[in-house]
Each structure stands twice: as structure tokens, then as C-alpha cells.
Amino acid sequence: MQLIVFVILCLLPFTSSASPLHGIVMKVTDEDIKSEQSLLSLYSKWRSIHRPYEKESDKTVHVQGCENKLLKRYHIFKNNVRLIHASNNRPNVTYTLGLNKFADLSNDEFRAKYTRSPKMFQQTRSKKLQSFMYENVTEPLPSYIDWRDNGAVTSAKDQGPCGSCWAFSTVAAVEGINQIRTGKLISLSEQELIDCDKKINEGCNGGLMDYAFKFIVENGGISTEARYPYNANDNKCDIKRTSSPAVSIDGYEDVPANNTNALLKAVSHQPVSVAIEAGGVYFQFYWRGVFSGTCGTNLDHGVAIVGYGETNEGVKYWLVKNSWGLDWGESGYIRMQRDEAQEGICGINKMASYPVKLANNLSSKTSNSLIQLSLGRKSFLST
Ligand SMILES: *[C@@H]1O[C@H](CO)[C@@H](O)[C@H](O)[C@H]1NC(C)=O
Ligand SMILES: *[C@@H]1O[C@H](CO)[C@@H](O)[C@H](O)[C@H]1NC(C)=O
Ligand SMILES: *[C@@H]1O[C@H](CO)[C@@H](O)[C@H](O)[C@H]1NC(C)=O
Ligand SMILES: *[C@@H]1O[C@H](CO)[C@@H](O)[C@H](O)[C@H]1NC(C)=O
């Protein structure tokens, strides 16, 4: 019986060229989990979409090796299918899981590959008294905001198998404030942060957004994505590319921890970098809807909040930009429940921060015009 399964798997007809279906998330139906046969056929379909380049059917592949590797994947896949089906059939669940590109990875493998370095995220933030520039923002705040509608968010990017989430989180927030201050949406370089921001951050091994903001301030800015493109590896810092930054910031601030309302104030003014626990299996297979867990609050992933709102059913959410490609979640995004819990969903209230940009003084250093920016009741003056 087992042997037959091996052989069938090894002879599955895989599509060999780029499939137009590449990246689509598949649902799990009652029919799919009815029998070994239906599960096998689901796996074959999933592989044809998500693993089109792995040609185990190729006659040159050693059959024994193929059997073992594929069988292991198939067992993992089956477990995931059952978990997804069970979760989607829970009563009143506000989100749906799907068979995405991670469907043949165990949760341990997923966590090791795509989330990184709890060690880095556990570091406490500096104890010094911090200012929070949105502290005195007048309420009520808008009930809905989506910074994508304002042109302040680039399309979701893909970190690949490199623990560089912190760089993507940082860049999303900087791209956002730069567009808000200058009107220009410029895609910026995560790779520069990975290669050059080495004082404390550790490239593909993890990092923290605040250190990256600090690097950008000290470096006088950050390069564009086009000039310093992403390759998901740790490389030597390219001094030439890092010495001609395209976008600068003036500083960064932390949002007071455990405070949903403070986070709301910040997000109503700009995209905000946050850390969450994303290593859980429900997060792994999130497809659509408002994610409400289960997840813990042991921070292991950096993302960016780029809006908030409320569904027709009255479920409040944060709109979160992830860095796992367009083929994860809602075109690269996840809506996460926004509640009053101290630490927030998956710890989202614990470590939020944002870059401060007063004006675009990178290209207009000689200009001495007064620029006044209204930030709630507070006004900043900058020459
Ligand atoms: C599901 O929601 C309905 C309507 O709000 C409620 O009556 C019911 O008790 C809920 N069921 C569970 C298991 O929470
Ligand atoms: C907010 O208002 C208080 C009281 O007036 C003031 O002490 C504080 O400095 C203000 N905070 C900011 C960030 O402007
Ligand atoms: C946030 O809340 C958690 C849980 O209540 C607590 O352990 C932690 O110390 C709080 N952090 C801050 C900075 O208040
Ligand atoms: C931009 O202006 C601010 C305020 O004047 C200043 O502190 C900062 O150093 C300037 N940044 C750059 C990159 O020139």
C-alpha cells in the first residue's frame, strides 16, 4: 500500500514550464479529505501549481531518493490539509486558511525558514524616556484608513528564505513616510540594510526595525530598490551603492507599548513597523478574512501596519503588509483583529515604531524655506 503511494507520487505528471496558476491558494473541501486517493490527487494538483519546477517524474532522478523525499512531503501536506479543513470549519471563525505555497512545510520548517530570531526581538527597548509625537493628537480619529489608497505603499514584496523581515518592515514604513512628506512613492532597498546595517542587526539571521531606522539616519538615507536590489543573501556591503541614498529620514520613535489607542494614533498618520508572532500554523496558512489567532505574543516577525478599519460584520482590524510575496494572504496582506487586549493580537502592540521625517531636505539642503507640518496639535518647524 505504502509502496504504491510512493510510485504514484514519483510518476505524477508535473507541468514543466511556468504555470499561469503559479502562486494561487487552493481551498480544502470535504471531498478532498474523504480518502487517501482524494488527498493524493489534491497533493498532485497542489504540486503542479506550487512546485512546477521540481521534476521528480524525470527519469534521471534516482527512484529511491525521490520516494523518501516526496513521501515525507506528502505526509506533512496531509497533516496541513486536515488542520486547514478543521480550522475553516470552526464556528464563527473570522478568517479562512488555504493551501498556499507553504503547504508542504511542517510548522517547524516554516518557522525556521520564514520567521527569525526571537532572540533579537526579545531585546528590550531603551529605557530612556521617549517622546511620542502623536501623543496629543486630537480624537476622534478616522474610523478607516488605508495608506495604499493614498499611494504610500509599494506592492507587497517577498523576502524569500532569508530572515530579513525586519528590513522589509523598516522599508515599508520609510517608503510610507517619504511618500506622505514628498508625494513620491519610491521603492527602497532592503538589501542595503541586510548588507550594511551590521552593527547589531544580523542580515538574514534577523534584526530589529529600530536599529535599521538608526542606520538610515546615520547613513544619511537609504538607496532605492532599483539601485541596490534584493537577492535574499548576506553579502558584503556595497559602499558605492550605499553612499548615494535616495531617501532620508530624520529619526524614529517608539509607540508606547501595550496601547492600542496610541498605535491607532500613529497609524492614522503614517505606516508603522510592528513585530508580531507569526510562526504559528494558523498564520502560516492564512488566506483571507480577519485573523484572530490562535497565536502567542513571542515576537518573531517584522511587518508593517498600513491601515485599519472594520468589516461589515463589525470586526475591527489592522491592515498589515507582510513580506511573503503576493501569493500569501490577501495579495500579500493580512487583516489582523484589532482589540483592546494589552499586547494586541500576536503581540502587535508590543514593539511598534516609526520613522520621523520632517521634510524632504535630502535634495533641498540649500533651500531655507520654512516648512511647517501639522501633526495634531503639535507643529514642527524645519528649515
Ligand atoms: C457564533 O455566533 C453566534 C452569533 O453571534 C452565537 O449565537 C453563537 O453562540 C456563536 N457560537 C460559538 C460557538 O461561539
Ligand atoms: C502633549 O501635551 C503635554 C501637556 O500639554 C505636554 O507636556 C507634552 O509635551 C505633549 N507631547 C507632545 C509630544 O507634544
Ligand atoms: C505589556 O503587557 C504584558 C502583558 O500584560 C507585560 O508582560 C509587559 O510587561 C507589558 N509591557 C510594557 C512595556 O508595559
Ligand atoms: C533634515 O533636517 C533636519 C531638521 O532640520 C535635520 O535635523 C536633519 O539632519 C536633516 N537631514 C538631512 C539628511 O539633511
Image (cartoon, helix red, strand yellow):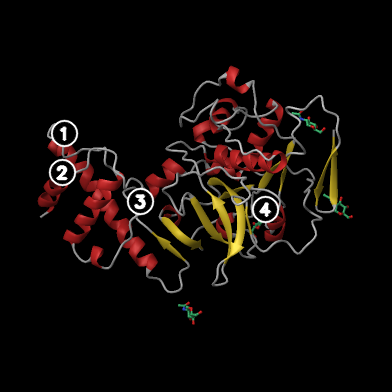
Above or below, comparing residue 208 to residue 215 in the picture: below
Q: Which residue is mark 2?
A: 10
Q: What whole-number distance in Å separates the C-alpha atoms at marks 4 and 3? A: 30 Å
- Point out the tag, 4 or 3, that comes first from the N-terminus: 3
Mark 2 secondary-structure assignment: helix
Image quarter for ligand 3 equals bottom right
Query: Circles 1 and 2: CB distance less than 8 Å?
Result: yes
- Point out the tag, 1 or 2, that comes first from the N-terminus: 2
Mark 1 secondary-structure assignment: loop
Q: Type of residue at label 2?
A: Cys
Mark closer to the observer (2, 3): 3
- Point out the tag, 3 or 1, that comes first from the N-terminus: 3
Q: Which residue is mark 4?
A: 267
* Picture quadrant where residue 70 is located: top left
Mark 3 secondary-structure assignment: loop
Q: What whole-number distance in Å separates the C-alpha atoms at marks 2 and 3? A: 23 Å
The residue that appears at 39% across and 50% down in the rendered structure is: 107
| Label 2 Cα crowd, 10 Å radius (few <14 / some 14-19 / many 20+) | many
Quadrant holding the N terminus: bottom left
Q: What whole-number distance in Å separates the C-alpha atoms at marks 3 and 1? A: 27 Å
Q: Which residue is mark 1?
A: 61
Mark closer to the observer (3, 1): 3
Quadrant holding the C terminus: top right
Q: What whole-number distance in Å separates the C-alpha atoms at marks 2 and 4? A: 50 Å
Residue 24 — which label?
3
The residue that appears at 75% across and 64% down in the rendered structure is: 140
